[in-house]
Image: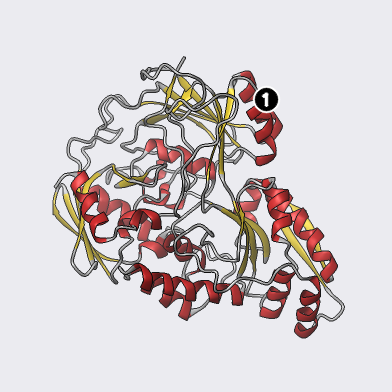
Amino acid sequence: MSGTTGIRTVKARWPRLTALIGMTLALLFIVGACGDDGNGGGGSGSGEIKTGGTLTVTLVSENNTLDPPVTLGTADTLITQQMYDNLLMIQPDLSMKPELATSWEPSDDLSSWTFQLREGVKFHNGKDFKAEDVVFSFNRLLDPVIDSPARPTFEVIEHMEVIDDYTIRFDLISPSAFFPEVLSIYQARILPSNVDLDSLTLGGVGTGPFILEEYLPGQRTVLSKNPDYWDKGKPYLDEVVFQLIPDPSTRAEALKSGDVDVIYQLEPPTAPSIEANPGTVVLETASSSHIGLDLGNWEAPFDNKLVRQALQAATDREAIRQAALFGRGSVGYDHPIAPNDPMFSSECLPPDYDPELAKELLAEAGYPDGLEVTLYTGNVGPGMLEQSVALKESAAPAGITVNLVQRPEDQFWANTWLIENFTVVYWFGRTPDQALSIQYMSDSTWNAPRYLNDELDALIVKARGQVDDAERAKTYEEIQCILVEDVPRLVTAFQPVLYGERDDVRNVLPHPLGWLILNEAWLDR
């Protein structure tokens, strides 16, 4: 069947699947300076696509590795998105676009999914794309030695059956209505089966719209147009440059002067100056991306649930939203399901900010004279430092002294997060199933609090196989209640996705899941 037919089949069976991809969003872009011309940028615009040119994107984060299964930092995620393709890709409007798969069809009981693959696709090294490359890529992702953070999500795969060169069936351990959507996550890029594995950290070979030309970790990355890209006529750009500029004010000035074209993950405090500047615009969309704090459930003091509940009561979420997001976005309720997601439940909510309740809980936990803790933080994501300072101030009246230790991003993700027992954290937006699987499943590498709950694990798996919306919502309500009660981590606020752009940039749209899709980007200049 065609790709369109495949998508319609899924939607017919589960009409709210698109809503479940993140949330029910009104994807309205708030554009500063000039009005939107319908092409994803400000200004009047010609409306006629122009080819060529270089798009320069500035990032705040350092590079770590370009090996897809183990990508961690924002920079690596965005670079690999341009070099590789997934089987399918969720678009900024939350539709699912066929990439290396052209269609997909489930079995009646959702225990297997069959994918038709795109023919005539070549990797950057000249190899023809076939089903063997899909098997190779997912076997690497599932390899316990590699220990991909996405491995728990894909361990639902029991077996991959190559039916022919362009047809593959995934047999699952348990039914999953969400299986196609998880194939779009950034660890699930498709590599050629003949790739030199030693080259993947600093290089890589994909089928994507751009080819890696220069990679200087911590400085810049240059990618050139793939002349043999399977989506004929694309990409429109000749070149994409990723430039690391850590300082927010320096990034803003670079955009205003025209030295860069896009600020990815624009900080809310910087947005007003970009909106007020002639020639630049701000694009915004709601998302399930969130900020929070990981509590090490494996050791004192956070192995005591009463201590975690005390910190929960001592957290002024609205103060954090104002400080970290400048009042944008929405407060979080200690789980990764955003308030405007159809699976969100208001049945179980954390207590309102209550320092006196926090004192009572601390005393019950054995800390009648208060508690002193060290929070590891840094400029490791939008609003992280501001969140930390706001938490320190809100916890003080409860007798909780929060000492802040700042770490640079490369040290934070490599040597602090997953190691220290109290850290800030920023998560890209994900579907409820993806977020819960990666952040809370007992065997997940990225379960930073090391929270172990067999009941929760079973409920996450149960929700995957529920086709009925009402039944699934009830399961997710149980999950949310467990997480609010146990407080393995604090989820303090949900961030909007903000891009700062030159007003002649077209089709570079903020993505609710935090991704950057550039195969249709062009410059109206």
Residue 506 spot, x, y in % from top left: 45, 26
Q: Which residue is disc 1 drawn over?
A: 253
Judge from the rendering whether residue 93 lies leftward or rightward of residue 317; answer left or right: left
Q: Quadrant of residue 422?
A: bottom right
Q: Quadrant of residue 207?
A: top left
Asked if residue 36 shows in the view, the reply is yes
At x 69%, y 49%, the residue is 324
**Along the line of sight, the residue nearer the viewer: 24 or 109:** 24
- Tell me the crowding category of disc 1: few under 14, some 14 to 19, or many 20 or more residues within 10 angstroms, Cα based: some
Q: Is residue 52 above or below residue 234?
A: above
At x 73%, y 60%, the residue is 375
Q: Quadrant of residue 17?
A: bottom left
Judged from this view, the residue extending furthest toward the top is 525
Residue 394 spot, x, y in % from top left: 79, 62
Give the residue type at disc 1.
Answer: Glu
SS at badge 1: helix
Residue 461 spot, x, y in % from top left: 38, 72
Judge from the rendering whether residue 81 lies leftward or rightward of residue 372; answer left or right: left
Q: Is residue 511 above or below residue 137?
A: above
**Along the line of sight, the residue nearer the viewer: 358 or 518:** 358
